[in-house]
Image (cartoon, rainbow, N blue to C red):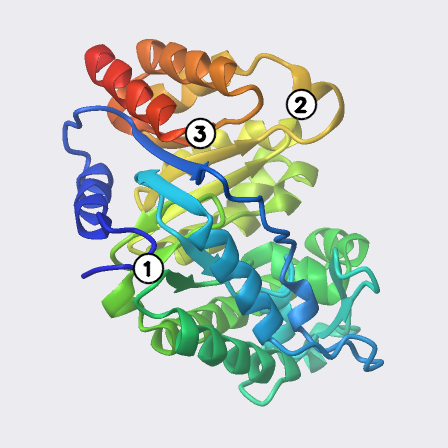
Amino acid sequence: MELEFKPDFEEARQRWDAFWRGDKLERPLVAASVLKPGAKPPKFGKLYGMFRHDTGIIEHDVNKYIDAVIDFAASHEFLGEAIPSCLIDFGPDDFSGLLGAKLIVSEDEQTTWIEPFVEDWDDADLTFKRDSEVWQRMVECIRAFRKRCDGRLIVTLPTIQGGLDALAAVRGVQELLTDLALAPEKVHEALKVVDKSYNEALDALCDELDVETYGSATRHQAYSRGRTNVPQCDCSCMMSPAMFREFGLPSVAHMAGALDAATYHLDGPDAVMHLEAICEIDEIGMIQWQPGAGEAATMDWSELYRKINSLGKRQVLGGGGDPLEACQRIKKMTRELDPDKLFFVANLPSVQVAEQLFKDLEKLT
């Protein structure tokens, strides 16, 4: 298969296949995007404005977003294992919109949120709704993007937040935490329904996007020839290990089990206590650590990287900041960790810098 903006797409797919199989690699995987000489960085913001605001203020033609995506892809070289792709999503909780929640887009189009609608679990309808406004608009956008982008770049799955995070969105965080203590059986029943809805929504999205032909990619640029997504449970930071194992872990395992390649989003220092439990799930192939803001963002997390490595999981790591410092950091991690389990995302200044980095990594592997 060929992609206009990724001439070596088939070769990159094969390297991704080897990575997910756990094969010995010639170097760690690196997704390096490089601005082409003479090109100006295009303005490419979030796509949340594609969704129609309930007031009608935001009612944009989806083609302006498609133009922006194509302009970005055309102005960059996608080197190594970088796959030009675009997620069709309306924000972090749009899966809850597929369950019937009302999705609100901020006027600056930079964020979205869900209005909780569950007041009583006995009356809650958490089934996947094809007649929901979110699903109808999502399909409309997917088809518009595919019409112009198929064969050029990958149009891929939104991040689907099921499990406890979905319940927190539709019920409210404080209300859900209270229910975990006072009505645990109701939460368990709701999770069963959400797990089923997750499967139905995932199947429907994969059909719309023809994942069987094109594969899919995550927001962290990890690619799979099959279904890949980012299971997570941000609620875990507010739960004890025992409570997470009872309420959070089963749905994480369910989400991962529905995928061909799963990357778990480990969010914040308070979630680290659940790492061992998460790594017990065989279907979780990779961990993406997000330290968050404040002091945690500046801390040295080398010990955590080594722990993830010792638990046998792959990990996606950043190579941002100053390009030369990023290259040095990538090489340092390659020396200290298992290179066959590393995937780096890096913005580099030139093809020459990227090619030299690849050669250096081969010598270290």
Compared across the picture, whether 118 is left or right of 46 comes to right
The disc placed on residue 227 is 1
Residue 241 position in % (x across, y down): 57, 34
Which quarter of the picture shows residue 135? bottom right
Mark-to-mark CA distance, 2 and 1: 31 Å
The disc placed on residue 297 is 2
The correct choice, above or below, for 61 with respect to 3 in the image is below
Compared across the picture, whether 158 is left or right of 309 comes to right
Quarter of the picture containing the C terminus is top left
Mark-to-mark CA distance, 1 and 3: 24 Å
Q: Nearer the viewer, mark 1 or mark 3?
A: 1
Extreme residue toward the front, this view? 38
Residue 36 position in % (x across, y down): 44, 40
> For this rendering, which residue is in front, 190 or 305?
305
Residue at x 46%, y 42% (from the top left corner): 264
Q: Mark 3 points at which residue?
A: 276
